[in-house]
Image (cartoon, rainbow, N blue to C red):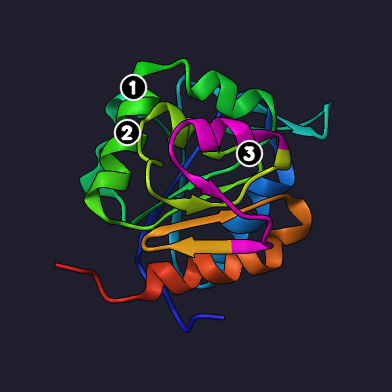
């Protein structure tokens, strides 16, 4: 694992239907490495996490995406779950935020169904990504090359397929956050 990411701010963009472990494990990894994690969402209050399709815990939203600026963060994490990214990709503020984040060159990490929001933001053309297998056609139609790998890094973009990939996903996420900024 990367040494320290002390003081680095990491946005976790999620809403109802987020796969709990895909939110909690990367957040815990960021915090254990000295980073500051913040849950941003398309709504105030709390979001409802799921364990597969079953309701799990709720998590407090720390900022609405409409009030978030890319300049406030050093990295972005897009957890999956089937419903979560589907809701996010229908929200103009979430799509704008993701597009601006990718275009900034700062690290963006998406797991499972998380890349759906990247597709909607129009930022995958010419990139190589992995995801939950059912997104393969969506990614290809958006101009990406899909690969079946535990974790794939394409410049500042880190992607993984599923919860079983979380150890590799978290390690690459921390590595990317810990890299010197490209000017």
**In the picture, residue 87 is in which quadrant?**
top right
Residue highlighted by disc 2: 97
Q: Earlier in the sequence, mark 1 or mark 3?
A: 1
Residue 78's x, y, as percent?
52, 42
Numbered tag placed on residue 37 in the rendering: none
Find the distance from the CA under tag 1 to the CA under tag 3.
Answer: 25 Å
Front in this rendered view, residue 55 or 119: 119
Above or below, comparing residue 119 to residue 155 in the picture: above
Badge 3 vs badge 2, beta-carbon distance below 8 Å: no
Kindly report which numbered mark, 1 or 3, lies closer to the viewer in this rendering: 3
Badge 1 vs badge 2, beta-carbon distance below 8 Å: yes
Numbered tag placed on residue 93 in the rendering: 1
Label 3: few (<14), some (14–19) or many (≥20) C-alpha neighbours in 10 Å: some
Q: Residue at x 63, y 46 (%)?
A: 131
**In the picture, residue 46 is in which quadrant?**
top right
Kindly report which numbered mark, 3 or 2, lies closer to the viewer in this rendering: 3
Verify whether residue 58 appears in magenta.
no
Q: For mark 2, give the secondary structure.
A: helix
* Start-end of magenta stretch: 134-151
Residue 130's x, y, as percent?
60, 51
Q: Is residue 61 visible?
A: no
Left or right: residue 23 versus residue 144 is right
Residue highlighted by disc 3: 136
């Amino acid at each position: 694992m990367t040494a320290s990411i002390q003081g680095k701010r990491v946005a976790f963009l999620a809403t109802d239907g987020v796969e709990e472990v895909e939110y909690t494990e990367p957040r815990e990894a960021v915090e254990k490495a000295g980073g500051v994690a913040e849950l941003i969402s398309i709504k105030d209050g709390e979001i409802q996490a799921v364990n597969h399709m079953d309701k799990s815990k709720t998590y407090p939203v720390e900022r609405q995406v409409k009030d978030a600026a890319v300049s406030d963060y050093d990295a972005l994490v897009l957890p999956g779950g089937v419903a979560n990214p589907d809701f996010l990709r229908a929200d103009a503020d979430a799509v704008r935020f993701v597009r601006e984040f990718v275009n900034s060159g700062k690290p963006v990490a998406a797991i499972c169904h998380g890349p759906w929001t990247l597709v909607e933001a129009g930022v995958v053309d010419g990139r190589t990504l992995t995801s939950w297998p059912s997104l393969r056609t969506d990614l290809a139609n958006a101009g990406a090359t899909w690969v079946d790998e535990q974790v794939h890094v394409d410049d500042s973009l880190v992607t993984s397929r599923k919860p079983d990939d979380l150890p590799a996903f978290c390690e690459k996420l921390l590595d990317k956050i810990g890299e010197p900024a490209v000017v």
